[in-house]
Image: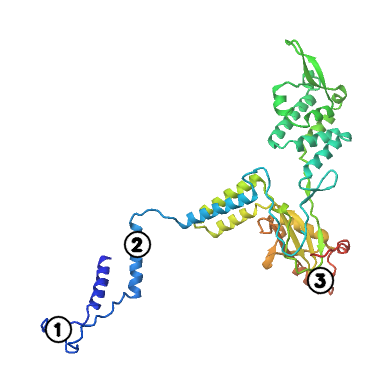
Amino acid sequence: MKKFFQEVKADIKFKSAGPGQRLTESAGEKIPKEKPSQPAHRQPRQGPTDEAQMAAAAALARLEQKLPRARGPTSQDSIRNQVRKELGAEAAVSGILEAPGTSMVPEPKEEGSAHPVVPAVCFTCPLTGATLRKDERDACIKAAILSHFSTDPVAASIMKIHTFNKDRDRVKLGVDTIAKYLDNICLHPEEEKYRKIKLQNKVFQERINCLEGTQEFFEAIGFQKALLQVPDQEGPEEFYVLSEAALAQPQSLERHKEQLQSAEPVRASLARQRRLFRPSPLASQFDLPGDFFSLTAEEVRREQRLRSEAVERLSVLRTKAMREREERREMRRYTYTLLRVRFPDGCLLQGTFYARERVAALYGFVREALQNDWLPFELLASGGQKVCEDENLAFSECGLVPSALLTFSWDAAVLEDIKAAGTNPDSSILKPELLSAMEKLS
């Protein structure tokens, strides 16, 4: 490499030395072409060629890599600092650092409608059928369960145990312990000790008494509180004692035990809020309410952590499968999605879904709106990509969050069979009751 630079320098020095002379000429002899009155003109210095410059730059780069030098700022550092600045600015604007218990609800963008096409994410109470907002569902379900005690105290107490207590592991442990008590009674009805449960028992206190609804359950199935004398103790102890009437019906105890073990928490179901719109150029514009984007303080902290991890991954080479997996993970942070299906006549069917629901839920939603629900059909996403019903994919995995517009079309093979039979498919695809409630998308 040094020899190369020496040759380049020698070439430059030779070209800038001016005209040469013969060895036979004396040093003081003048060149015939030059005028004696004028000094020798020095030629301008010429730089190296493009090829030489490229080779020199590559050589210098290799030399610099071998030499130890101080670590300067890298592109990863600048990206990390930029992300930190953006996170700090977002936190200062939203106030999440000062009030970690609040939720962040960004303002929806106004892209074409003055009012959101969905006022809010709503739910349906399974006990009353009432439509509830997100912040009303828990209070309404609790009130409905408490009011159910007047008609069916056993079922109400079971619902209270599974719904009011959020720790599922603790609920399972308590339910299994209660089932063990009832099994002992049914297997040994003549044993008096199994019909009594000491309330101050350590197992009872740690597994059962700590759960809401267990007291109501014991009383509903026939247990009564009583003060009984305990051997080797001065004062009486409080017990749950099974009544004679309940003991005479062991099949009822077995049925109540099975109900308790098979029960699930009472949860409000997501209201589809089905709406039908007339053909509109605003079909692909979604003005979503804040419920679709609201984040709790814990979700905000998790989002900051994920962004920091994303910065670290920028300098790592990733395969296509790794990038697709990260994109699907990014989609999972949405809870709900608003979907529209455009029919051949331009009408738009709209519904709200969980982002984790499967594509089959959308097919069932559309099938309920069809006059001929037995005919097979297809749903196409943007770009003509077919969304298959039997792939068992979630909306988040298909990229259909937080909103998407799909196109309805009849199955091509079925249409060919209908035309071959000499008939045409019904021009009216949707049910009349839906068409009568059609709205304008504005």
Q: Is residue 51 left or right of residue 427?
A: left
Q: Residue at x 72, y 37 (%)?
A: 166
Q: Is residue 376 left or right of residue 334?
A: right
The three-letter amino acid code for the residue at tag 2 is Arg
Amino acid beneath label 3: Ile
Label 1 environment density (alpha carbons within 10 Å; few <14, some 14–19, many ≥20): few
Residue 9, located in which quarter of the rendered image? bottom left
Mark 3 nearby-residue class (10 Å; few <14, some 14–19, many ≥20) = few
Query: What's the mark number on residue 358?
Result: none
Q: Earlier in the sequence, mark 3 or mark 1?
A: 1
Find residue 298 and report its horizontal and vertical position in percent: 64, 44
Q: Which residue is mark 1?
A: 22
Residue 269 position (above or below residue 50): above
Of mark 3 and mark 2, the one earlier in the sequence is: 2
Instruction: Report the residue marked by disc 3.
Output: 418
Whether pointer 3 and pointer 2 mark residues with C-beta atoms closer than 8 Å, the reply is: no
Question: Which residue is drawn at the image coordinates 57% and 48% (left, top)?
Answer: 305
